[in-house]
Amino acid sequence: MKYSEALDFLDSLVNYEKLAKSRNEFKLDDIRKLLGLAGNPHHKLRNTVLVAGTKGKGSVCYMLEAALRGCGMQTGMFLSPHVSTVRERIQIDGRPVTKRRFSHLVEQYVPFVRKQPVSYFELCTAMAFEAFVRADVDYAVVEVGLGGRLDATNLTEPVVSVITRIGLDHTGVLGKTVRIIAREKAGIMRTGRPVVVGQQVPEVGVELERQARNKGAELISASGRMRVWDVRPAGAGIGFSVLGELGAGRFNLRLLGRHQVENCVTALTVLGLLARQDKRIRLTKVRRALRKVVIPARCQIVSQKPLVIVDSCHNPDSGQALADVIADHLKQKVVLVYGSLRGKLIAQTIRPLGPWIEKAVLVRPDSPRAAEMTRLKQVFGRFRIPYIAVGSIGDALVQARVLADGKKPVVVAGSFYLAGEALQCLGMAASS
């Protein structure tokens, strides 16, 4: 099968990332049957770390994968959504699978999908499990797609589960309150196994503790296990000192934002647990590996002159995190290029950013779920943020640079779709 044919087959499947569906559309029956036809590859994985959460789960996955690989392990990583190419979702040793391997995976699963139809995400998940088994990875780092309890990734048996900060997102599917959302995320907990939990608001913390007791899981608070001090911006990144199960040391990340310290503390807590059984995991190697981590579309600096940052900020927590990055690192107002998907909490996301926006360029992402321009104008008008509206991300970037006039940074934010389009226009996207 040619790569183009593989993409066509995948695109022929129902894609819930582009098509909003009600809760009763999400079940595990189909993916369970598909995996059964394929020989249950997920049962053959040796060490799976399953990561859920609203904010930071992708960053934690990137950090865990890089650290484990830096300690000499062969790794697999499954992510969603992708930024530039669908192959980003399935990575072996820190690299997206090749077009050839991707095509072979699709070809293998076509007969099974014809017998048992599944969604776009479910097929990607099954293919990831297959790829990891074939590569005989030491560790599979798997990011939950949506929620936890009813996500296809939850068919794995993680040695450690991870729940990063929980906030309001996907409320039409997961629930209207953070406690209800926390209950869904807690579905990845396993009896008798540890679950590492990142910083949470009190009501979420209480709910996760209750769920852990009910399930018989060992709840481990990342902030309770690690001592962190001397956090400060360090060039185009962040530095901090830490003391935990792996030992004490100074970490310097090539990532912007104090929220990445929180994510790194969560990853280090997980690594400390894994190190109890795997002596290859050593602080010096972990620190060296994390120093090199670059995460696409997470406050990613793509240009210095003029300064252009691309972020996937799409919910209130990530809006606050981006505002903190601007305050700590840029220390001046920015020209914001913004576009969002329908159903997102746009006003709550923009509120913390408002004081830092000189002017905004509004654009709709290339997605059937793109928020209407009238909605964007309404929000920015309410906050009295000057804006112009354009028809494409290419035009938006041109207009943003004109408005910035070489004096203001340009920040692109609003969704993974918009971030991917921006990176492609800026020549920073991986080949599809």
Image (cartoon, helix red, strand yellow):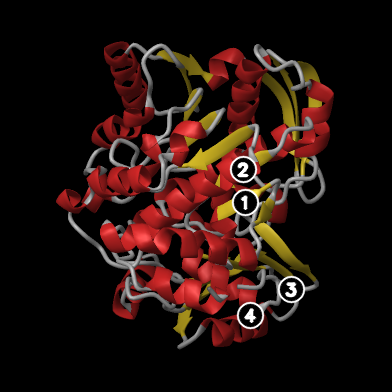
- Where does label 3 land, which residue? 407
Label 1, label 4: how far apart the Cα atoms are:
24 Å
Question: Tag 2 or tag 3, which sits nearer the N-term?
Answer: 2
* Local crowd size for mark 2, using a 10 Å CA cut-off: few (<14), some (14–19), many (≥20): many
Question: In front: 84, or 351?
Answer: 84
Q: Answer whether residue 83 is visible to the viewer in this image.
A: no
Mark 4 surroundings within 10 Å by alpha-carbon count, few (fewer than 14), some (14 through 19), many (20 or more):
some
Q: Is residue 389 left or right of residue 395?
A: left
Q: Could you say where residue 237 lies in the image, as x and y percent from the top left?
A: 75, 46
Q: Residue at x 66, y 81 (%)?
A: 401
* 296 up-or-down from 73: above or below: below
Nearer the observer, disc 1 or disc 4?
1
From the image, tell me which residue sits under label 2.
76
Task: Give the numbered dot on residue 425.
Answer: 4
Helix or strand or loop: what does disc 1 sit on? strand
Dot 1 corresponds to which residue? 91
- Percent across and percent down for residue 170 are 30, 51
How far, Cα to Cα, is label 3 from label 2? 42 Å
State how far apart marks 1 and 3 are (Cα): 38 Å
Mark nearer the viewer, 3 or 2:
2
Task: Check the picture and name the quadrant holding the C terminus.
Answer: bottom right
Can see residue 236?
yes
User: Which residue is at 35% across, 47% downward?
Assistant: 37
* Number of marks in picture: 4
Residue 277, image x and y in percent?
65, 13
Tag nearer the camera, 1 or 3: 1
Q: Quadrant of residue 399?
A: bottom right
Q: Amino acid at mark 1?
A: Gln
Mark 1 and 2 residues: CB-CB less than 8 Å, in contact? yes
